[in-house]
Image: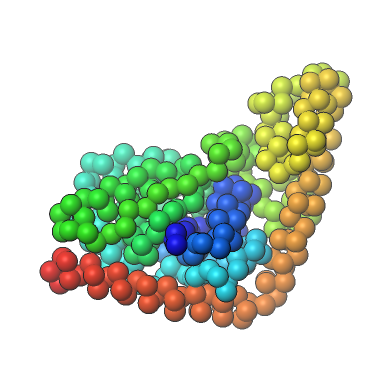
Amino acid sequence: MKRILTGIQSSGIPHLGNILGAIQPSIKLSNITESESFLFIADLHSFTQIKNADALKQNTFETASAWLACGVDTEKTVFYKQSDIPEVTELSWYLSCFFPYNRLKLAHAFKDKSSNFENVNCGLFTYPMLMAADILLYDADVVPVGKDQLQHIEFTRDIGIKFNNHYGEIFKIPDSMTTKDADYIPGIDNQKMSKSKNNVINIFDNDSNLRKQIMRIQTDSKNINEPKDYSSCTIFKIFSLIASESEIFEMKKNYVEGSIGYGDAKKLLFEKIKSNFKNEREKFNEFKLNPEEVESKLKIGSEKAKSAAKKTLKRVRSKLGY
Ligand code: TYM
């Protein structure tokens, strides 16, 4: 039985990029009967950015609600908060002492984030070590992620292999898994959609805010009647990730023939997002009114995760000489 594992930082409500790039594919994989899955909220990772206790709690709750609204089956899935299992930080320390500093300096995500954030702390730099610990602690086989996280999975594999070569078999070496579509889901500025770039589409927002986000998608200045290049247009790119084949065909045709303006294309995208994510939006609002239910689901998951973590850490400590 394959073990699937993935996490989402709780640095804000998960956006459309998180949902299409990681949440939906992970839930789909988890529903395969011959697999078991560990899905979690990476609330220790979000401490690299969020230094306000209320905001940290609120983000964690909203991230959990988003996972649940998208259909995590907590009967089948170990669904938990990273911070409930502090064993992960101990493992992260062991991994940090093994991984070459010069290699960690090459992390793309760190370079990207450190150019966006004012607060570039050591945690942000050693972030991939905590992520490697998240994965190795639970003997994961497959880690579904967006393409921006692939290098971190490579680091994880490398550390696992190094440890195994040095101490004998300790860790299971995981494989990454990405969706075959776009490299990344673009944000409203056509860059990678990212909370830190302030370019997100938040499907859980109310209609009025959601409409505003979509209306802010950047385009060129072609008029309604001019033929348009769908392949470079952000509205079309996002639309084509969630629409049916016939809807995509129709939209393409309208672009090429110059029979749709960007304003109308945005309205179609808005309606498509609303209809596609109707259930998720409703459930998210229900969970928001029932924080106890979310907490109790997380508590059950954390207990299961803790027991798996303890076993691995016992194995690791004994191999390392502690
Ligand atoms: P995070 O919270 O930045 O993103 C969560 C997941 O969403 C994917 N993603 C995207 N996919 C496509 N297009 C986008 N624009 C986009 N933006 C984000 C990410 O690739 C990711 O899969 N370090 C991780 C969280 C983490 C983790 C782990 C993941 C911590 N420990 C262990 C897997 C296994 C992160 O910051 O993801």
Q: In this view, does 304 lie above or below 113?
A: below
Drawn side of residue 15 relative to residue 157, left or right: right
Locate residue 110: give its quadrant: top left
Residue 232 at what x, y percent from top left? 65, 26
Q: Residue at x 82, y 40 (%)?
A: 268
Residue 153 at what x, y percent from top left? 38, 48
Quadrant of image for the N terminus: bottom left
Q: Residue at x 77, y 58 (%)?
A: 278
Drawn side of residue 236 relative to residue 30, left or right: right
Quadrant of image for the C terminus: bottom left
Quick check: can you spot residue 246? yes
Q: Which residue is drawn at 16% across and 65% down?
A: 320
Q: In this view, does 285 lie above or below 246?
A: below
Locate residue 246: give its quadrant: top right
**Between 286 and 124, which is closer to the camera in this rendering?**
286
Quick check: can you spot residue 195? no
Residue 135 at what x, y percent from top left? 38, 59
Residue furthest left in the image: 321
Residue 205 at what x, y percent from top left? 71, 57
Q: Which residue is drawn at 72% across and 33% down?
A: 236
Colour mode?
rainbow
Count of all numbered marks drawn on residues in the image:
0
Drawn side of residue 295 relative to residue 167, left or right: right
**Between 54 and 138, which is closer to the camera in this rendering?**
138
Drawn side of residue 187 relative to residue 147, left or right: right
